[in-house]
């Protein structure tokens, strides 16, 4: 197997998984979207896989842009910021609030993904029975 094809296959698999997760989250939040996704899964799974790959590529790009912007913000030196009474500058305070918010959001998303995974397993088990 050609290493380039293998890398492309792995990347497409990642994007399909990412897109499927994104679609699953959307379908859980919207019952109409859930029915649409389930009907697509029954009728044309290959087309749905392509849609998930496209959605995954878009989500991957958005995540990269988000991480790049966070890294860019952290690497910028604080210029002309005034110090607070505690000896920390305004950038440090804002950064710590942002970091705690990001950590909170990550924990919420992780919990949501775990719940989605459990629900997907229940759906698969109910379809098998």
Image (cartoon, rainbow, N blue to C red):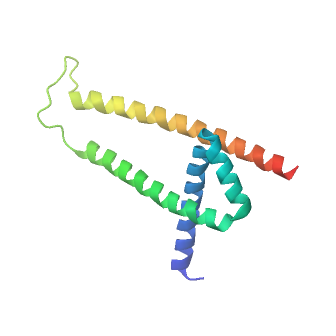
The x, y position of residue 45, in whole percent, is: 68, 64
Along the line of sight, the residue nearer the viewer: 67 or 20: 20
The residue closer to the viewer here, 16 or 95, is 16
Q: What residue is drawn where x is 35% and y is 33%? A: 98
Is 62 displayed left or right of 117 in the figure?
left
Quarter of the image where the N terminus is located: bottom right
Q: Is residue 64 above or below residue 80?
A: below
Q: Residue 110 versus residue 3: which sits nearer the camera?
A: 110
Image spot of residue 71 (x, y percent): 31, 47
- Residue farthest top in this picture: 85
How many marks do you count on the picture? 0
The residue sitting at the left extreme is 80
Question: In the drawing, does residue 87 fall left or right of residue 122?
Answer: left
Left or right of 68? Residue 38 is right
Q: Quadrant of residue 118?
A: top right
Q: Residue at x 88, y 49 (%)?
A: 129
Seen in the picture, residue 98 relative to 16 is either above or below; the reply is above
Image height of 76 relative to 45, above or below:
above
């Amino acid at each position: 197997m050609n290493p380039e094809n293998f890398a492309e296959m792995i990347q497409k698999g990642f994007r399909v998984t990412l897109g499927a997760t994104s679609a699953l989250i959307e379908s859980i939040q919207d019952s109409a979207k859930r029915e649409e996704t389930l009907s697509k899964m029954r009728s044309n799974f290959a087309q749905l896989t392509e849609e998930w790959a496209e959605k995954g590529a878009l989500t991957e790009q958005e995540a990269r842009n988000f991480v790049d912007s966070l890294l860019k913000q952290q690497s910028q030196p604080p210029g002309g910021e005034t110090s607070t009474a505690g000896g920390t500058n305004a950038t440090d305070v804002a950064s710590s609030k942002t970091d705690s918010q990001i950590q909170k959001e990550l924990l919420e998303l992780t919990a949501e993904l775990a719940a989605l995974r459990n629900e997907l397993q229940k759906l698969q088990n109910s379809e098998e029975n």
